[in-house]
Every structure is written in structure tokens, then in C-alpha cells.
Image: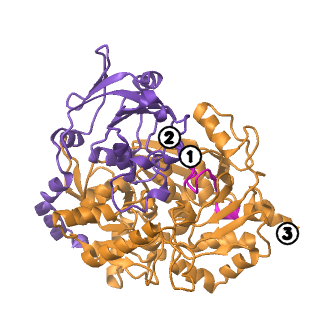
Amino acid sequence: MNPRTLFDKLWDAHVVVPETPDTPAVLYVDLHLVHEVTSPQAFDELRGRGLAVRRPDRTLATLDHSTPTLPPGPDGQRPYASAEARAQVAQLEANCRAFDIELHGWDSAERGIVHVIGPELGATQPGMTIVCGDSHTSTHGAFGALAFGIGTTEVGHVLATQCLLQRKPKTLAIHVDGALPPGVGAKDLVLHVIGRIGVDGGTGHVIEYRGAAIEALSMEERMTVCNMSIEAGARAGLIAPDEITFTWLKGRPRVPQGEAWECAVACWRALASDAGATYDREIRIDAREVRPTVTYGTHPGMAIALDAPVPAPRNAPEARALAYMRAEAGRPMRGMPVDVVFVGSCTNSRLPDLREAAAVLRGRRVASSVRMLVVPGSEAVRRAAEAEGLHDVFHAAGAEWRVPGCSMCIAMNGDLAQPGQLVVSTSNRNFEGRQGKGARTVLASPATAAASAVAGFVADAREVLAEVAA
Amino acid sequence: MKPITRLHSRTAVLPDENIDTDRIIPARFLTTTTRNGLGKLCFHDWRYLPDGADNPAFPLNRTEAHGCSILVAGRNFGCGSSREHAPWALLDFGLRAVLCSEIADIFRSNALKNGLLALVIDAPAHRWLLDHPGIELAIDVAGEFVELPDGGRIGFALEPFARHCLLHGVDQLGFLLGQSQAIAHYEQTHPEAA
């Protein structure tokens, strides 16, 4: 057999009916993740046609997008942003009851952001196909699973048939050679990559991240990288599973146990791209060149090192983006005054992300001009963070420690910035108005976000940490 | 979905590149549980001034853009989220086609499943259309071309199954349900899918 890429192997193993010139492949879905925002119309479609969910056992739901991150008030009521948001959550609860789907709702100790709990539960496994009505489903590719976002019509397709109609996408290998410098992390790397290839550089492709710098990343860092694949337009991001993957997954509730585990690992080891396998495109990045990176414009491709001068706009839209951000060509983003700092989202809300932010905040205070929100990705992350006292660090620094959810990443639950405010955010999108109408977003790593909270302006964590040591 | 064979309209133009799904419909409106009535929210924060009045700087608010059902948009239209609310909003707003030199994958897939013609054309033709708003076009789905007033043609390639579904109003879920034997066979022969 010809050498195959990781993607080829995942694709081939899930073809139910091969594609023809006239029809796309029917592709089997191993795991369907569901949340309250993109599913109600799909359940209605099933109801309208009198259809059942084909595989409730392969469907897993959670509440994350529209949910408040403040606890219930004295009356026991959760502070939803609107009656509509409350009704949307109630509708998913009712749909999961009616269609016999496991829901990690308010009463679950495992509730959290869909792309945080899938891996935590071990529901996300190498070799799987995973879909969700959410573009950041690419996160799960960190485990060597083919994972991508779908629309609500397709959510209905998967609920009813456990399959999707798909044309085989192209492949893009991104080789990251060398090692990241100290104080530079996965978020810096992926922002650097998107800055290089552009916000549409991955359109039509599935990215496989490869090379020494990728192999050295922890699972949480790999999730950060794969999460942002969609921000380069790619459908999915992939990293070959290895010992780091297996160690991370072992013993989690949904992974095979005992002998079945050994057997699964043996299969998963064979998923890596074969020597000599070819990609439609290949790009090389030198990890040694990556510095703490932030965005300066209104899409994630407008990213530069935080101490590098903002590039002169090349066209009217770029000029408009700079004007919106109040960024000045020729000056670095470092030093720009900050109003709000957000640490959270499916990109950066896992325990190591919170530790990274806490390491900067320990013994320091959030600047009086800054409001800082720290929102753990899941109840499990919240428990683990509180067990090691991270919440005390955040409280002592003057930051707000919230209940898990998507929060200010998508800003549809009432957590948002005011018009004109500048937010340094560990989330994934800096589109105009993404974090509130007129709000300006600078995407950054947890370390950069925390350092900026302390400084009151966009700051380099390495410098903030050095200051007190001196 | 109703069959779509041909579409005539003048064009409206939004030349910005990378018009993302948050601009098409801001996330705070996604608490809806229906797909109807989203047209009034389409391009909301661009289209209206803070006091709720029409923003005169928004190109689709201009009189000459009224009634246009073909949008020519800057490169990489629909980037960002997977929200199908974006094509639902555009359709309810009155648009039936988006022409662009590059369209984000998930948006394009969602649009075509709802009968919104998300069509990729080559960069020179795209440039020309961006520079000529208000031109009368006819889109021929079967022939895969856009006809200009002078009879000139701009080709586009639709994925054959998407084209078939548009032309015949095929229900894709119905098609997939028709594969249930093959799906059951797959589940039986793949222990990990059992």
C-alpha cells in the first residue's frame, strides 16, 4: 500500500460509501458533541420528520455558550443574559431527555466547554471522527482524531444517521522545527503560524502539525494549536498521537481499560503518517523565531510579535482594521492601554493555562484600571485549580474567578466588554464586535494576558516576571 | 428546499475582505431556537447606528442596493464560526447568492444546503464585479456560469452533488437516510463503531 498520511488513515477508516464524481463520501462519525446554540433547529427537524437519534450512545451534550458564569443568586436563579438564553438551555435539556442523550448539564460535575470536556472524559480518542456544531471542534485533532465543525443542518444529519456527506479535503503539513524559546508557548506559536499563512491560508485543507517543536508540546498545548486551525480557514488540525497522548488519556472514564487499552494503544501507534507520505502543501516554520505574539487587527491572521512594529496597512480593509483597533502602524502593540483581560475559552482554559496566568499574578495585583475575568474550561478544571489554590491567587490579585463556560470568547452570555474597550484575551477570535459591540480584542497567551492585566497595558510576561525578581 | 435553476438580479457589493460570521450575525443573537426571522439582525452592528437608525456608510443601506439578491463580497467571505444562522440571516435579508473569489468552507457548505448560492469565481472576474456594483447578472446553476449584460460569461464550479441538490431541490437528509443499509453494514463490520 502507498504511504499514507495520518489524515488519509482517518478518512479511509470512516468511509461508509466511497465518493464518486457525482456524490460525496458518506463518512461515519464516531463522536457527536452537542451544545445548546447550534442544535435546537436540528432536533426540531428530527421531530418534524418523526426520526430518532441513531446513536445516542455516540452523542454527548453539554451547556456552555449561553450559560452565565456567575453562580445562582440568593433566589437560586441563575443570572441568564435573557429569557431567550434561559429557554435555549431548557430546550437542550428537554431535547436530551426526549432523545435519550447524555447531557452534562448544571447538575453534572463534568459540565464545561464542549472542547474541554470531550478530552477530559476520554470521549475524545485517537483515530476517531468527531464533529460538533462548532468550528473549534478542530481542538480534538490534538489527539489524532479527525475533528471538524459542522452547521446545524449537518447536526441533524449526524443525529439521524451518524454520518455526513463529505468531499475529501486537501492536506497541508506544517513542520515546526527546533524548540520554542523559553517563555514562548503554544498560543504564541499558533498565532505566529496564522500570521504567516493568513486567515484563509488553510481553506480547503486539513492541517497536520509536525516536527520537533510539536512533539515537545503537552496535550493542552497541542489542543491550543489545533483549536486555532479554523482561524487559518482549515477544517481541521491534526497531531499524530504519541506517548504524551497515551499517558494523558490513560485511565480517563471513557477510554478502554485493561487489556483493551493496550490493544487500543497499539492501533493508535499505527496512525502516524507513514514515511514518504505526501501532502498537497507543506510549510516549514522555525520555532526558534517565535516570540510572544499578539494580534493587532480584526482577524487572527493580523498577528505579530508583541514588541514588533505594527505593519503599515496594505489596503483599505487593513487600514480600517487598524483604525478600529486604534493601533498605529510602526508602533508595537506592547504598551497599548488595556481595559479588560479575559483568561478562558476552548483555546486556553485548561489547568496549565490557568497555572501560566497564576504564575504571573502570584504576589502581584491587577492594575486598578483593568477588569480581569478568569473562567475555567470545565468543572473538573475548576476543581483542580481550586485544589491547588489558583483561585486564591486570582482573587488576591483582584481578578474575578467564574463558573465554567465560553463566557467572553463569544460574549453571548452577558460577559462582554463595552464599546471601545481593549480586551487582552486568551480566546481565538478578534473579529469586530466579537467580545461586545465596538470592543477591541487582542489575542494573546495566558502569560501575556496576565502580564497585561498587571501592567495595565499590553506587556511581555518575561519582563513583568523579571521586574519583581530584580 | 425548492429547486433553483436560474437567478436574475442586480448586484450589491461589500468589498471588505474576510467578512466573518460575527459581522453577518453577531453572537448575542444566537440564543434563538428557530431559523426564521433573522434578516432584521443580518449585518446588525454594521447596518445600524447605535441609535437604531440605518448607517448610511453601510453599502447595502443605499437605495441602489435595495432589492438586490446577488451579493459580491470581498475575498474569504463567511470566515469564522460554523453558525448556520449566517446563511439563514442572509436569506431572510433577501440575498440568494454570494459571489466571491474565495469563500470559507463551513459557511459555503451551510449556505448551499439552504439554497444560498455561495459561488467561487476567479480573481479577475471577482475584481471586475467588485468594481461594478449594480450590474445586472443572471446566474445559471445548471450551466455553471454567471451571465453579464453583454452576454459575457463568468464560470464557476459547484461540487456536483451540491449542484444536483440545488437543481432538483434534493433533500440531503433524505439521501443519507437512504444509505441506512450501508451505515448498518459499516457499524457491523467495524467493531469500534458497534
Residue A447 is labelled as none
> Can the viewer see residue A360?
yes
Q: Are marks 2 and 3 on the same chain?
A: no
Camera-nearest label, 2 or 3:
2
Colour in which chain A is shown? Answer: orange
Tell me residue A305's x, y (percent): 69, 48
Q: Is residue A235 magenta?
A: no
Q: Secondary structure at mark 2?
A: loop
Residue sitting at x 58%, y 74%:
A351
Q: Is residue B127 left or right of residue A164?
A: right
Which of the 4 quarters of the picture holds residue A121?
bottom left
Q: Secondary structure at mark 1?
A: loop
Identify residue type, mark 1.
His
* Residue that mark 2 sits on: B18
Q: Are marks 2 and 1 in contact (CB under 8 Å)?
A: yes
In this orientation, which residue lies closer to the viewer: A80 or A280? A80
Tell me residue B62's x, y (percent): 48, 31
**Placement of the C terminus of chain A among the 4 image quadrants:** bottom right
Q: Chain of mark 1?
A: A
Q: Chain of mark 2?
A: B
What is the magenta range? Answer: A429-450
> Can the viewer see residue A262?
no
Residue sitting at x 30%, y 30%:
B156
Identify residue type, mark 3.
Val
Residue A299 is labelled as 1
Q: Residues within 10 Å of mark 1 (few under 14, many from 20)?
A: many
* Residue that mark 3 sits on: A468
Colour in which chain B is shown? Answer: purple
